[in-house]
Image (tube, rainbow, N blue to C red):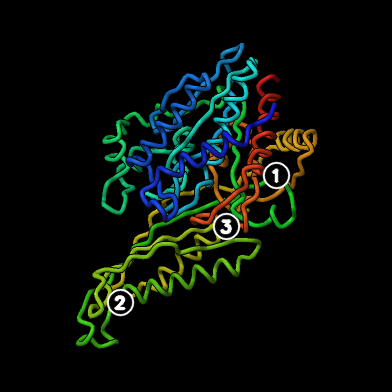
Amino acid sequence: MEAKVERLQRDIEALAQFTATPGAGVTRFSFTPEDRAAREYIKAEMARAGLTVREDAAGTVIGRREGEVPGPVVMVGSHFDSVKHGGPFDGTAGVVAALEIARVLQEHNVKTRYPIEFIAMIEEEGGRFGGGLFGSRAMAGKVSREELLRNKDAQGISTAEAMAAFGFPPENIKAAERRPEDLKAFFELHIEQGPVLEAAGIDVGVVETIVGIVEYEVEIGGRPDHAGTTPMTMRADALVAASRVVQAVERLAREAGGGAVGTVGRLEVAPGAANIVPGRVRFTVDFRAKDGRTLADLVAGLKTALHEACQGELTFTLTEKLSVPPVVLPEAIRALLVREAEARGISTKVMLSGAGHDAMVMAGLTDVGLIFVPSRGGRSHCPEEWTDYAALKKGVDVLLGTILQIAEG
């Protein structure tokens, strides 16, 4: 049994049309008209593949294929939200992989011992509300009502408000939780988002470790004053303080080594006029590392930098948006993926994931397998993001064979 390239291409191209920025990449934030259009397409394709379709309390689309016994369930899928001006494959490739596996099983009238659920999650990127990994964290019971009220988009709309307007009552969020005993395994296919596989001529990456991530929103408060009449010695310039912290983030990550990274990806200055001393600055800090001790040291360094930068009238607040520890995926699942690839003549490489994925959260609930397919030029999170459809098919075939083994075992 094999996936069909033409169907993978059709799905990718169809979903790429559901964007708020036509002609400038894919922008598909959660609980938006673009989200609605994409999920309706996904639900329709699931139904055509013979699945029973529902949406959980967090907005994840789930298509279920019953087995000979009621459980535990094997899950496969990814996310279908995007970053701003992103590409057509990030997350979507994993959702399309799940759809195609469902079609292949239907075509061949395969009956597995255990049920299989094909899932499409939202807000993995955190592009609208910050934080990210929303669908998987809801399944793991790690989304609180307080978070739904606290996290807001650029227009000041909270996650709770957006959910309610979209038809998902936020007070029901706990209903999305899944019990570990009800899950047998979770599988995710993703584009690599880096250059390693393409450069080495390798077909599929089998992920061993996913880096840990901590993400904060920082707000520094100063005093807005006239830029011409306020002496330099009498200013409480929030942007100057913020710039010192930004430099500290760069320094801390470089000094940590071991592949640790630190990023300030968004910065807002207020009042935002050329002739006013900045009175408030809000920015994000994203740290990633493959071990928890390094992450803790980076966070401690950030707090120290904030205290040192904010003296006198300057103040700061530090709000945690996301904290997920590093994850080592099960060796037995990795071995199954490698053996399946070898049986199909598909080359593999065991590797580290420097990006976060829903798989890292699901690893707290069940055994997880995560595979990568090559990204052309290593590009991602941009309109130029591309994976050849023949390369995507190889990943789907590996996943198909492995899932069948797990669903039978």
Of mark 2 and mark 3, the one earlier in the sequence is: 2
Q: Residues within 10 Å of mark 3 (few under 14, many from 20)?
A: some
- Distance Cα–Cα, label 2 vs label 1: 50 Å
- Distance Cα–Cα, label 1 vs label 3: 17 Å
Amino acid, disc 2: Asp
- 12 vs 341, left or right, is left
- Residue 167 percent across, percent down from the top left: 30, 31
Q: Residue at x 50, y 42 (%)?
A: 13
**Quarter of the picture holding the C terminus:** top right
- Residue 50 percent across, percent down from the top left: 52, 18
Where does label 2 land, which residue?
237
Query: Which image quadrant for residue 35?
Result: top left
- Distance Cα–Cα, label 2 vs label 3: 37 Å
Query: Which image quadrant for residue 306?
Result: bottom left
Amino acid, disc 3: Arg
Looking at the rendered structure, the secondary structure element under dot 2 is loop
